[in-house]
Structure formats: C-alpha cells, structure tokens
C-alpha cells in the first residue's frame, strides 16, 4: 500500500462530491486488526489527502475531513476538519476510499475536542479494528504456538533475537520486551536479518521498521510490537516465501 512520496500529489480540501458512503450490510468486508496494517492505510490517506467521510451516530449526511498526519510510534493520527464542522461528542463512523480499489471504515467514540492552536484539528488514537472492502493485500500468516519462529540480526553493534509473530509476502511482525527492542525505531534499516520460519524454512532478508507499538499482556507484561517490511529479498527467497504462505498454513483470523 506504500507509494513513494515523490510520486504523490496531495489533494486539496475535500468537496461534497468526495463523500464516501458507508459499507453496505449486504457485503462481507475483511476485518483488519493489525496496527501495522491500520497505520499503513491511514498513512496512505494522509499522504494522498483523500477525503474521509464522518458519520456521527444518527446522522444520514456525513461531515468531510482529511487525515493531516500519522505517527505510527505512539500510535496516533490527526484529523483535519477545515471547511467543515467537528462531530458532536459520541460515536462516529469514518469511511474513506483507498486507491480506488478498497473502502476503509472504522468507528471511534470521543469528545472530538480541537487541538490547542488549531480549531479544526482533532487528535485520535488508532482504531482497534477497521473494515476493508475489496482489499487487495498480501495474505498474513500468524505463527503457530509452540514452534520456533524468530528473527536474528545485528544493528548498531548490538545483536537481536526476537520472536516472529506473523509474516506475509510483504514483511514480518516481531515482538519483544522494551529492553530487547532498545535501539529500534521507525525507519531503521536492518540488513541481513535471519528469519527462521519453523524447523523447515530459513530466509535472509533486509528489513525496514515501519511500526513500533507498546502494549501489555497479563503473562508477559510490557511488550513492543515491531512491524517490518521487506526492503530487499532475493527472487528465489521471495518465491520460497510465496509457496510457504500459500501452502495451507492457517490464515490469521480476527477474534470476533
């Protein structure tokens, strides 16, 4: 879903014709819950300046906004309601079109208070999940419990070995304690990472850190989720990974 920044011409303020309708009840959208994927989608909307249609609870007509900026490290983002009005306090549904081939929809409940110094900007954290209709994306596989899936690499004179949480043909998701992840930040390039996908497959690839998200679990305590995209991977290894992804490993499912 990434587009090189140099090729993007950000659109102007949204017009009434840019409004996008809600996803209908007669279709079956995909539920996206991975914050790395959600951050990618929001960043694409921000870079392009695409309109986001906001439907406050009980409203038939929507308000128009754009996403001004995205910070995947926190993770949070900023709505720009310039030329419109802010939603009333409470729940609202947000709908946008991405690249003309996917519709993104999510719900949030907030007071929708403006940020200091700008009456049209509103800060919000990433939604827990999004509905995506007609999503053209790579299949993401969650690693099975009890099998050794790890990523090993060196960076800044330090050696890392982190559990590998999930993977796709486009990248991998890692996890670790804050101490294990010290030195990693969004944008960092990792060269020659050794990815052990169970006992039968080991790949070597260059990675780029695209998302860092702290969270807490009951059993493990403070953790950090690291989303990485492949910066460089050989054609042979790409083909091997594609066969592995499509070989029948259970696809990651969202908990409903």
Image (cartoon, rainbow, N blue to C red):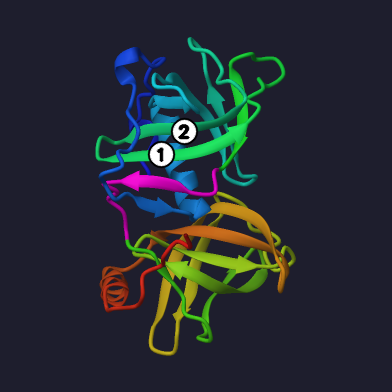
Q: Is residue 1 visible?
A: no
Disc nearer the start of the sequence (1/2): 2
Q: Which mark is residue 105?
A: 1
Q: Residue at x 53, y 13 (%)?
A: 85
**Residue 101 rendering spot, x and y as whole percentages:** 25, 40
User: Mainly helix, strand or loop, the magenta region?
Assistant: loop
178 or 139: which is nearer to us?
Answer: 139
Specify the farthest residue to the front.
58
Q: Residue at x 50, y 86 (%)?
A: 147
Q: Is residue 203 above or below residue 4?
A: below
**Residue 206 rendering spot, x and y as whole percentages:** 45, 64
Q: Is residue 188 left or right of residue 52?
A: right
Q: Which mark is residue 154?
A: none
Where residue 226 sits, quadrant-wise, is bottom right
Q: Residue at x 46, y 21 (%)?
A: 65
Q: Is residue 73 visible?
A: yes
Circle 2 Cα neighbour tier, 10 Å, few/some/many (<14 / 14–19 / ≥20): some
Specify the farthest residue to the bottom.
199
Circle 1 Cα neighbour tier, 10 Å, few/some/many (<14 / 14–19 / ≥20): many
Does the magenta segment cover residue 129?
yes
Q: Answer whether labels 1 and 2 touch (C-beta < 8 Å).
A: yes
**Residue 55 rendering spot, x and y as whole percentages:** 45, 26
Specify the farthest residue to the top.
83
252 or 189: which is nearer to us?
Answer: 252
Q: CA distance from mark 1 to mark 2?
A: 7 Å
Q: Residue at x 59, y 35 (%)?
A: 109
- Secondary structure category for the residue under label 1: strand
The range drawn in magenta is 127-138
- Secondary structure category for the residue under label 2: strand
Does the magenta segment cover residue 157?
no
Please give the residue where the numbered disc 2 appears in the rendered image.
Answer: 93
């Amino acid at each position: 879903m990434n587009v090189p920044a140099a090729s993007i011409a950000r659109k102007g303020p949204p017009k009434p014709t840019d409004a996008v309708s809600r996803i209908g009840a007669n279709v079956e959208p995909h539920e996206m819950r991975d914050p790395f994927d959600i951050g990618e989608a929001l960043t694409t909307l921000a870079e392009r300046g695409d309109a986001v249609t906001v439907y406050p609870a009980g409203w038939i007509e929507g308000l128009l906004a754009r996403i001004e900026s995205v910070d995947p490290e926190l993770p949070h983002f900023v709505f720009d309601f310039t030329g419109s009005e802010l939603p009333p306090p409470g729940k609202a549904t947000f709908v946008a079109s991405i690249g003309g081939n996917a519709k993104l929809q999510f719900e949030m409940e907030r007071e929708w208070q403006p940020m200091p110094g700008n009456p049209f900007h509103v800060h919000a954290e990433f939604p827990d999940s999004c509905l995506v209709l007609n999503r053209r994306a790579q299949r993401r596989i969650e690693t099975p419990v009890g099998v050794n899936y790890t990523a090993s690499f060196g960076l800044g004179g330090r050696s890392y070995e982190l559990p590998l949480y999930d993977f796709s043909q486009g990248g991998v998701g890692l996890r670790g304690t804050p101490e294990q992840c010290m030195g990693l930040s969004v944008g960092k390039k990792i060269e020659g990472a050794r990815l052990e996908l169970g006992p039968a497959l080991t790949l070597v690839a260059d990675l780029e850190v695209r998302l860092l998200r702290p969270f807490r679990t009951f059993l493990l305590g403070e953790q950090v989720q690291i989303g990485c995209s492949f910066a460089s991977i050989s054609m042979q290894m790409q083909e091997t990974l594609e066969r592995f992804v499509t070989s029948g490993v259970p696809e990651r499912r969202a908990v409903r």
